[in-house]
Image: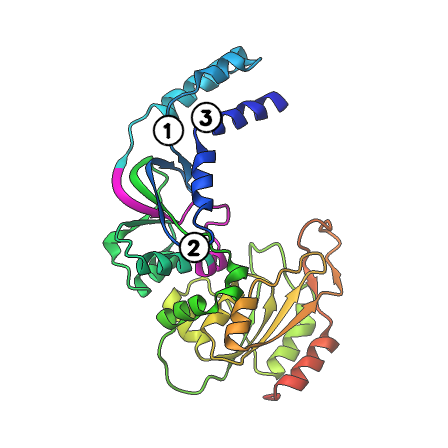
Amino acid sequence: MPDLRRWLSQMIRNLNLWEFTQAAELGTNEHRLIPVGEVFLKGSPAMVARSLTLPFQIFRDFSRAEELTGMSKRFVRDVLFQEPDEEWDEALCLDAFLWHGNYWHWIMECLPKVLLAEEQGFAGLYLIPDNDLFAESMSLLGIAPERVRRNKGALLRIKNLYVSPRVEGVKLIEHLPLLAKLRDRLVPKTEGAADKRYYLTRNLPGVTVRRIVNEDQILPLLERFGFEPYCGDGRNMAQQMADFAQCRAVFGPHGAAFTNALFMPPEGLLLEATSPHYIYHHIQPVIRLLRHRHFSLVAVRGDPGFPLSDEPNLYIDPVVLETILLRELEPVR
């Protein structure tokens, strides 16, 4: 296994991914686009390479090359020597990172890249994850549909791949005007009182982490203060933005659903339940921008079925939650 890892590491170097990465880093400080010529992309999330030339010396140097004959042949035939499915002149890839399907990463890291690219006159294609919400968000930003391509994993040859500025979502707290601009472009102009209160439940079929294990104790308390369960599944982005434009208070476990706090009116209330083993203030830029009142409710104990290295399910002290609610909100019943 160590030899195989070494072989793969050498393969990556010979495909010139390091050169591409170094080019990407050049754009981190000045927020400018850098064209990288003759690039190949494949897969989702997309792997990027500057060359598809097979490094034969790797096989000669590798001590067990004879054991990998079949694999190497398949690699050459199926990956390196196939013809590109499509060739594009100019593109910006928004589907080349591990959490490419996550709502928070998309809103807080990818869409700011789009704004920056458009400001610099980029007129090429955007390669995005194959996701309905993400495609809708591009339309809401005013990007023409013909410039947005969903990544189906095909092998693409890009004459000029534009490396976008490196945007880390939590660091948008240092670039609040950019976040404000994104909000202004997305948030619907609605009228009427914003008085909704949402419980962002994760106690749903198929969800295995960050469930509230004592939800039976918490629900009556939330109902007393007018909270209603809310789940974004099945709602398009325009619906979710319209819902949160009418929302004044949110309670729920840490997760991507808190991204929608960006669409709330200013000075809302966010009650975020977190694991004592995983505390990550991912929504702080939004809190700073909109002056939301934010409380982290650290679970007093987790589900013993989860090891400490994972995110356990959460037990929320109802007394602590009630104390905060009594201070911040009026009961509705």
Between the residue at mark 1 and the residue at mark 2, the CA separation in whole angstroms equals 27 Å
Q: Which residue is mark 1?
A: 51
Between the residue at mark 2 and the residue at mark 3, the CA separation in whole angstroms equals 29 Å
Q: Is residue 256 above or below residue 163?
A: below
Q: Are marks 2 and 3 in contact (CB under 8 Å)?
A: no
Q: Are marks 1 and 3 in contact (CB under 8 Å)?
A: no
* Residue 102 is a magenta residue: yes
Q: Residue at x 47, y 61 (%)?
A: 108
Q: Is residue 288 above or below residue 144?
A: below
Which quarter of the picture shows residue 252? bottom right
Q: Is residue 329 visible from the viewing direction of this image?
A: yes
The label number, if any, that marks residue 30 in the structure image: 2
Front residue of 37/150: it is: 37
Left or right of 19, for residue 36: left
Q: Residue at x 39, y 65 (%)?
A: 237
Of labels 2 and 3, earlier in sequence is: 3
Q: Secondary structure at mark 2?
A: loop
Q: Secondary structure at mark 3?
A: helix
Give the x, y percent position of residue 171: 53, 60
**Kind of residue at badge 3:** Asn
Q: Which image quarter is the C terminus in?
A: bottom right
Bounds of the magenta segment: 87-108
* Residue 77 is a magenta residue: no
Q: Residue at x 67, y 85 (%)?
A: 326
Q: Which residue is mark 3?
A: 14
Mark nearest the camera among 2 and 3 is: 2
Left or right of 174, for residue 325: right
**Kind of residue at badge 1:** Ser
Left or right of 226, for residue 220: right
Left or right of 205, for residue 80: left
Q: Is residue 327 above or below residue 212?
A: below
Q: Secondary structure at mark 1?
A: loop
